[in-house]
Amino acid sequence: MLIKHKKSWEIAEREATPESVYLNRRQIMAGAGAVGLASVFGSAHSALAAPGDDGAPMSAVRNEAYQLDRDLTPEDVNLTYNNFYEFGSHKSIAEDAQALEARPWEVTIDGMVDNPTKIDIDDLISKVGVEERLYRHRCVEAWSMTVPWIGFAFSKLVEMAGPQSGAKYIRMETFNDPGVARGIKTQPWYPWPYVEGLTIEEAQNDLAFLVVGAYGKQVADQMGAPLRLAVPWKYGFKSIKSIVKFTFTDQRPVSFWEQLQSREYAFWANVNPEVSHPRWSQATERVLHTGERVPTLLFNGYEEQVAGLYADKQDLGDLLYR
């Protein structure tokens, strides 16, 4: 007899926020054919993506293993409240971010791997397939949102790369073009390009997700087109945007914000309400669009799925943040 163990984020299907909350009628009709094909082939994770400009319809079947206990953040909120320092150090960068050309886009996989490669983003999508997952997102600035991401498990890219036995970390790098992103030109004191990193074990965790879409469309420029990371148990600055390179290495990467101020923005950056940011408490968070302030959960509510990654750390409480 098969016994299914329910994950801590799972809720009954009838309680999941319906697609009508975030997909308008045109988007639903555009995706209907792909969903139908996915049903015919019997895969809960198959999808049909439409390559082209960002915002093009992207249909993916929802993976019901990833649910939420709160409503999805409306799309217009997520499209107009963004951190993307390449385009400016404020939240209203959506218009400036339209200068980003998300196609064509090549992704490099190199370092300590058996299969180094450079691959077009749409070829990568076709190779690995995509699905939809509902995730929380918690910013280190103590606000939060929820997003219907479309993408694929990071573990698929790790498997494709074939990491060598000595590889322990994955260093990720954002595009670096001051001709496109004026924030790079006007803020030369920042250590461009934006760099982030995970351990290989973190990248292979079921929750680690590489995002190519949201709200039934290719992911918007201001949200990190055409490829970004979502690691929902960590603070948002770990979820690097507009990725161009994955380097497998035996050296722990020094991330963008860690270079600037390691005391405030350290490598692990796991959500922990008990460890305050040096300038504010992390005990609660402001939920965008609702006006509510709610208690923050350890690992952003994903403790059951990720706590084991840090079980061998001598000072777990400290390392959850630092």
Image (tube, rainbow, N blue to C red):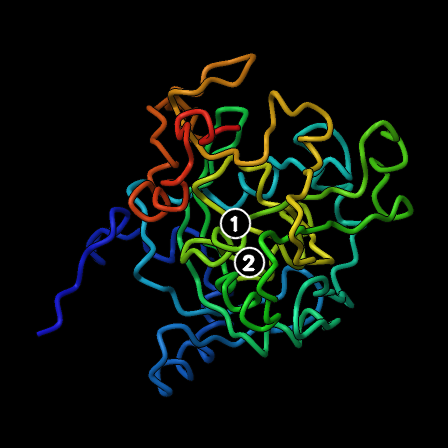
Q: Earlier in the sequence, mark 1 or mark 2?
A: 2
- Which residue is at a point 47% across and 30% down the rendered structure image? 319
- Which residue is at a point 80% across and 34% down the rendered structure image? 191
Residue type at mark 1? Ala
Quadrant of the image occupied by residue 71: top left
Quadrant of the image occupied by residue 87: top right
The count of marks equals: 2
Circle 1 — which element?
strand
Residue extending farthest to the left is 1
Which residue in the structure is indicated by mark 1?
Answer: 230
Give coordinates of residue 161: x percent, y percent. 62, 70
Residue 210, numbered circle: 2
Give coordinates of residue 282: x percent, y percent. 44, 20
State how far apart marks 1 and 2 are (Cα): 6 Å
Please give left or right for residue 104 compared with residue 204 in the image: right
Residue type at mark 2? Leu
- Which residue is at a point 49% across and 47% down the rendered structure image? 231
Residue 267, numbered circle: none
Give coordinates of residue 249: x percent, y percent. 67, 55
Q: CB of mark 1 within 8 Å of CB of mark 2? A: yes
